[in-house]
DNA sequence: ATGTCCGTAACCTACGGA
């Protein structure tokens, strides 16, 4: 089974690229983030033509997440308790529970949104208790956290910034401690498996990126090849994030 | 690093968010 996560930065703006990518890579289950569309505008029909069922939560302007599957899809949850923004969707895709998350950005350390981000991560951790870490689980998406200093292009540029603070890293670490493994993807190029590059200042071409999109899997998910699909970040009209693709097989 | 891109509201430009 091939699974993937991708922050598409608007499914409307990215639809032709998304459909091409789905045809080329043919993932069985996909977590999307930042669809930025209402349920009414979600392209269910286009996806269905490629064999995908979809669970989408979105209210239009910001956020929005989806789970796509061509191995069956049973919706399990569409909201993180106490946090109604459309940033969380979970569905059963064949043998695998797939959760798509779009963790709040945090904006800046003195912004209330930063505390919201920490609370969101803590709530996500508590919500894991609805599941059993011995079951096949993938939690994937845009976590807006770089787990180590090596997960940003230059840690010195992040002094006083969000995404690299101990509190944010702890928030993600607690998810791992529950029983999830951070799948280390091969980089698409260079030494670092970055998944995000700012649109500005030629950051992508300089490979000044960040690893902030993760695929987290439980122990009954056997992980094969995993890579950052850097090709999807190239060319005209890309998202600012690249997808992460992972080959998995389910034990038992 | 602050060089771009997204959607929206309200109008062909400015703004919030990332």
Image: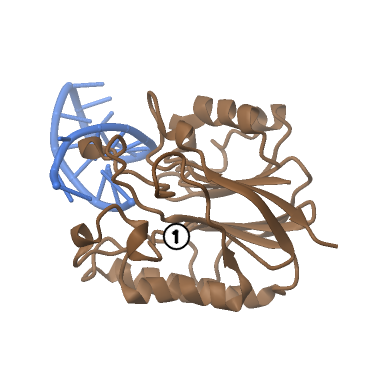
Residue A146 visible within the image: yes
Quadrant in the picture for residue A154: bottom left
* Near-viewer residue (A55 or A17): A17
Residue B14: give x, y in percent of width and height: 14, 38
Q: Is residue A151 left or right of residue A130?
A: left
Question: Can you say which quadrant of the picture contains the C terminus of chain A?
Answer: bottom right
Quadrant in the picture for residue A160: bottom left
Judging by the rendered image, the residue that carries numbered circle 1 is A143
- For label 1, the crowd category at 10 Å Cα-Cα, with few meaning under 14, some 14 to 19 and many 20 or more, is many
Q: How is the image coloured?
A: by chain
Q: Is residue A69 above or below residue A162?
A: above
What chain is tagged by disc 1? Answer: A
Q: Which chain is blue?
A: B
Q: Which residue appears at 70% of the width and 73% of the height?
A: A131
Residue A51: give x, y in percent of width and height: 74, 32
Quadrant in the picture for residue A178: bottom right
Residue A186: give x, y in percent of width and height: 51, 47
Q: Which chain is brown?
A: A
């Amino acid at each position: 089974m091939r699974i993937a996560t991708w922050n598409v930065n608007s499914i409307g703006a990215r639809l032709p690229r998304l459909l091409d990518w789905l045809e080329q890579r043919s993932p069985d289950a996909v977590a999307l983030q930042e669809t930025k569309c209402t349920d009414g505008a979600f392209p269910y029909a286009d996806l269905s033509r490629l064999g995908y069922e979809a669970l989408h939560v979105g209210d239009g302007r910001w956020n929005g997440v989806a789970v796509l599957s061509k191995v069956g899809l049973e919706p399990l949850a569409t909201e993180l308790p106490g946090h109604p923004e459309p940033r969380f969707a979970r569905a059963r895709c064949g043998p695998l529970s797939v959760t798509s998350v779009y963790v709040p950005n945090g904006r800046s350390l003195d912004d209330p949104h930063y505390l919201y981000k920490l609370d969101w991560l803590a709530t996500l951790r508590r919500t894991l208790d609805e599941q059993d870490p011995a079951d096949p689980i993938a939690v994937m998406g845009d976590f807006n956290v770089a787990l180590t200093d090596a997960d940003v292009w230059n840690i010195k540029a992040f002094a006083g910034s969000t995404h690299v603070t101990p509190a944010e890293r702890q928030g993600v670490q607690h998810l791992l401690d529950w029983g999830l493994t951070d799948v280390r993807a091969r980089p698409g190029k260079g030494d670092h498996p970055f998944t995000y590059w700012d649109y500005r200042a030629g950051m992508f071409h300089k490979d000044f990126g960040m690893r902030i999109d993760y695929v987290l899997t439980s122990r009954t998910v056997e992980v094969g090849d995993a890579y950052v699909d850097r090709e999807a970040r190239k060319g005209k009209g890309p998202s600012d994030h690249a997808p992460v693709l992972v080959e998995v097989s389910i034990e038992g």
